[in-house]
Image (cartoon, rainbow, N blue to C red):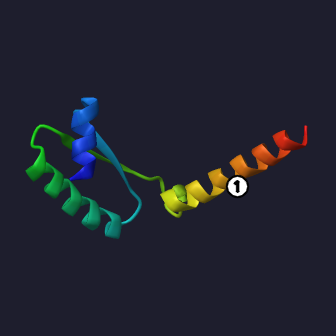
């Protein structure tokens, strides 16, 4: 419910989701179906990852980003 509530709040017509593997599709299909029942006016589009990027996950990217940001902040503090 939170995703479609946010999408409505910002006036979005489409929610874009990424799929890396069959297991992602099964999960995302369930989420998209629930979202469709809650907000029939908002579509869900799926983007399929290229095989060389299929190992990436949001949590992994977030951890990398946090480390880069932390390194940047520490460098800035030293100046």
Q: In which quarter of the image is residue 16?
A: top left
**Label 1 crowd bin: few (<14), some (14–19), many (20+), radius 10 Å:** few
**Residue 2: x %, y % from top left:** 26, 51
Q: Residue furthest bottom?
A: 23
Q: Helix, strand, or loop for circle 1?
A: helix
**Residue 3: x %, y % from top left:** 27, 48
Query: On the rendered structure, is 47 left or right of 52?
Result: left
**Residue 48: x %, y % from top left:** 38, 52
Q: Which residue lies furthest to the right in this view?
A: 79
The residue lying at 17 percent from left, 51 percent from top is 35
**Residue 29 visible:** yes
Q: Residue furthest front?
A: 77
The residue lying at 65 percent from left, 56 percent from top is 64
Which residue matches tag 1? 67
**Residue 57 visible:** no
Q: Residue furthest top?
A: 11
Closer-to-camera residue (76/46) = 76
Closer-to-camera residue (70/15) = 70
Closer-to-camera residue (5/14) = 5
Query: On the rendered structure, is 17 left or right of 29?
Result: right
Question: In the rendered view, would you say 44 is above or below 12?
Answer: below
**Residue 52: x %, y % from top left:** 55, 57
Question: In the rendered view, would you say 52 is above or below 42?
Answer: below
Query: On the rendered structure, is 9 left or right of 49?
Result: left
Q: In which quarter of the image is residue 10?
A: top left
């Amino acid at each position: 419910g939170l995703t479609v509530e946010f999408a409505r709040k910002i006036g979005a017509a489409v929610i874009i989701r990424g799929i890396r593997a069959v297991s992602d599709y099964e999960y995302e299909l369930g989420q998209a179906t629930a979202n469709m029942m809650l907000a029939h006016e908002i579509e869900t589009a799926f983007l399929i990852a290229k095989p060389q990027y299929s190992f990436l996950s949001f949590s992994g990217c977030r951890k990398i980003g946090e480390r880069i940001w932390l390194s940047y902040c520490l460098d800035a503090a030293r100046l």
